[in-house]
Amino acid sequence: MDVQILTGQQVAEMLQVPPRTLEEWRQTHHGPPWRRVGTHVPYSHTEVLAWFEGLASHALAPAARRRAW
C-alpha cells in the first residue's frame, strides 16, 4: 500500500488556507483527519481529499435548493 504523507504546510497550500487555520481546526476537532507522530502532525493525502470531497457535497446542497425556488 502506497500512502502519500503530507505536512501541515503542504495541506495548507493544497486547501489554500493559512497553516494557522489547520492548527485551529485540530484544536476544535474540525478539518481533515490527522495523526500525531511525536511532535509531528502528518496528514494522509487520500484522507485530506476524501474530507474535502465530503465538504463539497454538503456545500452544494443548500445552493441547489435555492435555485429550485
Image (cartoon, rainbow, N blue to C red):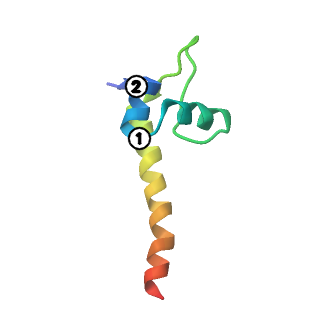
Residue annotated with mark 2? 6
Q: Position of residue 24 (x, y in %)?
A: 62, 35
Indicate whether 24 appears above or below 69.
above
The N terminus: image quadrant = top left
Quarter of the image where one finds residue 26? top right
Three-letter amino acid code at the position of disc 2 = Leu
Q: Position of residue 10 (x, y in %)?
A: 39, 28
Q: Residue 15 or 36: which is nearer the viewer?
A: 15
Quarter of the image where one finds residue 4? top left
Indicate whether 43 appears above or below 65.
above
Q: How many marks?
A: 2
- Looking at the image, residue 34 sits to the left or right of residue 64; the answer is right
Q: Position of residue 7 (x, y in %)?
A: 43, 23
Q: Earlier in the sequence, mark 2 or mark 1?
A: 2
- Outermost residue on the top side: it is 38
- Outermost residue on the left side: it is 2
Question: Which residue is rendered at x = 46% and y = 28% of the image?
Answer: 43
Question: Which residue is rendered at x = 45% and y = 61% of the image?
Answer: 57
